[in-house]
Image: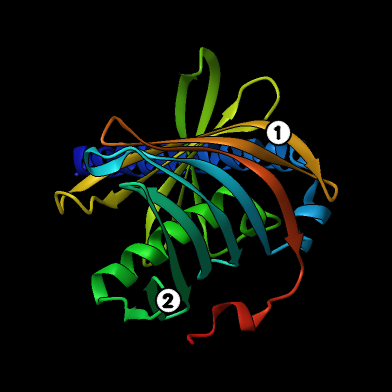
Amino acid sequence: MTRIRLAGLSFALALLATTSARGDDAADARALIDKAIKAHGGAASLAKFKGGAVTFSGTFHGMGMKVPMTGTISTFGADRLKADIEVEAGGEKFRVIQVLAGDKGWSKLGPTETKDMSKDELAQGRNEQHAGYVAALTPLVGAAKSYTLAPAGEMLVNDKAALGVKVSAKGRRDVTLYFDKTTGMLTRFDQTVNDEGSGREVAQETYQSDYKDVQGTKQPYKFVVKRDGKLYLEGEASEITLTETLDANLFVKP
């Protein structure tokens, strides 16, 4: 009986130690997020802006191609996105519009061809927009009760030490954020995506740099995306604007 009691006590102590460690881990992750929020402009400024627009130029490298592009990407919250992009391929220019609006989505190629997103395309779009919203830090201001934070270790990002935080939310794929150990600025975020070429789930890494002041916040003007370890997309913003309210007309299907 004594051995059983001791075994029970040992189990309880082990459980207590595990719980305490998990609590400490969550506190460490929260502290790192709070430092990053301060570095990016502060809680008040970040919480105010739930949307924005980025005008950019860049190059798409996916599926064995190298395609120049320019355009504007508008977002709001975790499930609203409109990409209005002009690409150049084979000596011709094409306009591509893709819209995610909550539980619906559609794309338009050229002046007339409009198509609804499939169930898989919609799920992919929602996961990617969720990751971008988390990377903006806006939903992590304050208690952020719908998100679970956990340390993700230390690594080098562009030859500088960075500390990671894994962000989990019900119904969404995890997003791992990496912040410069010294400055607290976001330098990289990772997610899992479905590769359109192979159909496989692959790792995607997004690198951000060249931060500038935008409406009381710090925003990255350069980005590089790697998918499955290969260069996928790179570009530079020419203008970034932030918004407090939703312009529903942006996401209306024509």
Q: Where is residue 213 in the image (x, y as percent from the top left)?
A: 81, 40
Name the kind of residue labelled 1 in the image: Tyr
Q: Where is residue 132 in the image (x, y as percent from the top left)?
A: 52, 53
- Which quarter shows the N terminus? top left
Name the kind of residue labelled 2 in the image: Pro
Q: Where is residue 174 in the image (x, y as percent from the top left)?
A: 39, 51
Circles 2 and 1 in contact, beta carbons < 8 Å: no
Residue in the foreground of this view, choosing between 170 and 189: 189
Q: Going by the image, does 151 lie left or right of 247? A: left
Q: Which residue is labeled 1 in the image?
A: 211
At mark 2, the secondary structure is loop
Q: Which badge, 2 or 1, comes first in the chain's sequence?
A: 2
At mark 1, the secondary structure is strand
Q: Which residue is labeled 2 in the image?
A: 111
Q: Where is residue 33 in the image (x, y as percent from the top left)?
A: 64, 41
Say which quarter of the image contains residue 48: bottom right
